[in-house]
Image (cartoon, grey):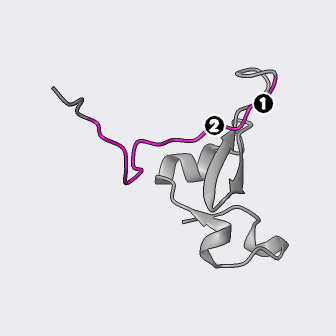
Amino acid sequence: MHHIVAWALGGGTDLDNECLLCGYHHRTFDQRGWQVIMKDGQPYWIPPPWIDPAQTPIRNTIHDHDHDPVPAD
């Protein structure tokens, strides 16, 4: 579980301030220049400027409940 606003900086331990990350990304995402924000209860990732100069927030939707990984015939 990742705190969006760090617990040490006063971030809460409620779902509005947490998202799931694998261990590797939890340890390294900030070192690589990524940031995370919450919008409408969903985490949005802000890439570093060297990946996206506009730093457009993006979402990983692979685990969304309405995501259908297999196209219908």
Q: Which residue range is magenta in the image? A: 54-69
Q: Secondary structure at mark 2?
A: loop
Residue at the image position 70 percent from the left and 55 percent from the top: 39
Where is residue 45 drawn, in percent x and y? Answer: 66, 42
Residue 7 in the image: above or below residue 4 = below
Type of the residue with mark 1: Gln
Q: Quick check: 57 left or right of 15? A: right
Q: Secondary structure at mark 1?
A: loop
Query: What main secondary structure does the magenta stretch of the protein show?
Result: loop
Judging depth in this view, the residue of 65 and 20 nearest the camera is 65
Q: Quick check: 26 left or right of 73? A: right
| Residue 55 - label | 1
Q: Quadrant of the C terminus?
A: top left
Where is residue 34 drawn, in percent x and y? Answer: 71, 40
Residue at image mark 2:
58
| Residue 27 - label | none
Residue 58 sits inside the magenta stretch:
yes
